[in-house]
Amino acid sequence: MTTKRERRMQRMQVMSQRRRMRLWKRWAYFFIVSGAAVGAGWLLVPAFWVQGSRSDDAAIVEIKGTMGGFSTSMIRAKAGQPLTIRLTSVDNRFHTDGGGKHQFAIDYLKVNIIAPPLGTREATFTPAEPGIYDYYCDVCCGGRANPTMVGKLIVEA
Ligand SMILES: [Cu+2]
């Protein structure tokens, strides 16, 4: 036979155990949520920071290379101002010609970017003089003979 007092003690013990359990859950929840928030911040902040600091001093042109040609066949830039060309190859490595690589080259300005299959490469350069410069890709099918893998960089004063 348990006395009334013992039963009350038991009930109180169970209640305090439950309370501890609830507290523990709250802490676990807090740690998981704050951990996820810190992780997301750690991933996102550098992306914004890099973009912000880049755009101050260089114009960025995104250009895609596919078997159909460059996504952009004319680029405008200002003489004396840094220009970043970011070339992405949209083709995978199973392409028979060039293995999915594409190039962005301007001989006169000594620019030569080669993007790997499904990858992105960039280069920053400053065209000093106004003019019209031809750019081309010479690593995929047809090479320089391919009329779609060429374009013009127009540098204005
Ligand atoms: Cu190409």
Image: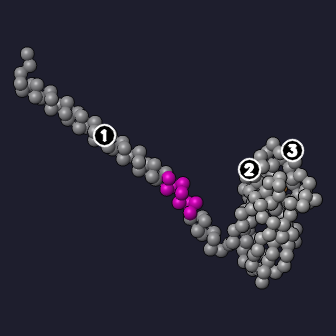
x, y percent for residue 121: 74, 58
Mark nearer the viewer, 1 or 3 = 3
x, y percent for residue 36: 46, 48
Q: Earlier in the sequence, mark 2 or mark 3?
A: 3
Q: Which residue is identified by label 3?
A: 96
x, y percent for residue 15: 19, 33
The number of numbered discs placed on residues in the rendered structure image is: 3
| Crowd rating for badge 3 (residues with CA inside 10 Å; few <14, some 14–19, many 20+) | few
**Quadrant location of the C terminus in the rendered image:** bottom right
Let me know if residue 136 is in the magenta part: no
> In the rendered structure, are the residues bearing label 2 and label 3 in contact, judged by CB atoms less than 8 Å apart?
no
Q: Which residue is identified by label 1?
A: 24
70 on left or right of 84: right
33 on left or right of 25: right
Does residue 29 show up?
Answer: yes
Q: Which stretch did the figure color magenta?
A: 40-48
Q: Residue furthest bottom?
A: 157
Q: Which residue is identified by label 2?
A: 118
Amino acid type at mark 1? Trp
